Amino acid sequence: MQHENPYQPPHGALADQLSPGAEPGLQYAGFWRRFFAYWVDALVFMPLVALNYFAGNQSRLFSLYAFVPGLILGWWFHVYLVRRYGGTPGKLLLGIRVAMLDGSRVTTEAAVLRYALLFLLSTVASVGIQLGLLEMTDEMYFSLGYVARAQKMVELAPRWYKHANILMQVWIWSEFVTMLFNRKRRAAHDFIAGTVVLRKLD
């Protein structure tokens, strides 16, 4: 008859979830590594920001023409690269990757879910800005500098643009806040998609 050791750790699904050693071999990416990966990704887009600046000085409707290509680029960057390579350039350069909860390769569905809410909010905000742009004449547009021009587009945008933009900013920063309050450093979109971000061991 086998006797159970009363001093051994408890077994069961709940105990496995609470036990720090329940997922051997998985090393979760820390807050700062994920934070800096976000800003590395922002730097990757700087050439496009520069292109938008120079092209916008030549054509009032450049950002309107670039709207749909920009949406496609966003899906390629945040969904395809995550699904294909396990992360965006910022994550890969800092040695971290997106994975499912068990450490397996991220699925297409999960990659889509991670980006879906940000895509929705940013698209709505972008549409609002484009509507503000269409309210401007060429004379008004080219009479203003880059910053003043952007401010004018915000002024002319529909009322709901400001609400959409606030929601987008709240969502982005809440991602970082969420990471501070769980052991696996999962952001809000990780909970939605059932993913984690791990340190690459190879």
Image: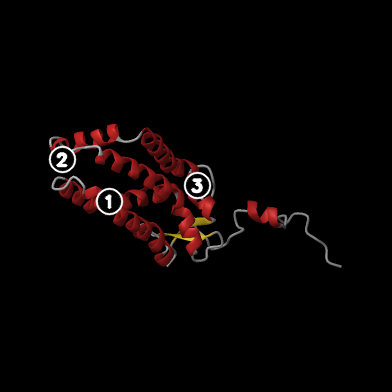
What residue is pinned by disc 2?
138
Few, some or many residues within 10 Å of mark 3 (<14, 14–19, 20+): some
Q: Nearer the viewer, residue 136 or 169?
A: 136
Q: Nearer the viewer, residue 162 or 50?
A: 162
Residue located at (31% from left, 55% from top): 68
Q: Indicate whether 41 appears above or below 125.
A: below
Secondary structure beneath disc 2?
A: helix
Residue located at (25% from left, 41% from top): 134
Q: Nearer the viewer, mark 2 or mark 1?
A: 2
Q: Quadrant of the N terminus?
A: bottom right
Mark-to-mark CA distance, 2 and 1: 31 Å
Q: Nearer the viewer, residue 55 or 12?
A: 55
Mark-to-mark CA distance, 3 and 1: 23 Å
Secondary structure beneath disc 3?
A: helix
Mark-to-mark CA distance, 3 and 2: 42 Å
Residue 121, given in percent of the width and then of the height, sits at 41, 45
Q: Quadrant of the C terminus?
A: bottom left
What residue is pinned by disc 1?
43
Residue 188, label in figure: 3
| Amino acid type, callout 2 | Asp
Q: Left or right of 8: which side holds 20?
A: left
Residue placed furthest toward the right: 1
Residue located at (72% from left, 55% from top): 10
Q: Earlier in the sequence, mark 2 or mark 1?
A: 1
Q: Indicate whether 150 appears above or below 88.
A: above
Q: Indicate whether 91 appears above or below 126.
A: below
Residue 128, label in figure: none
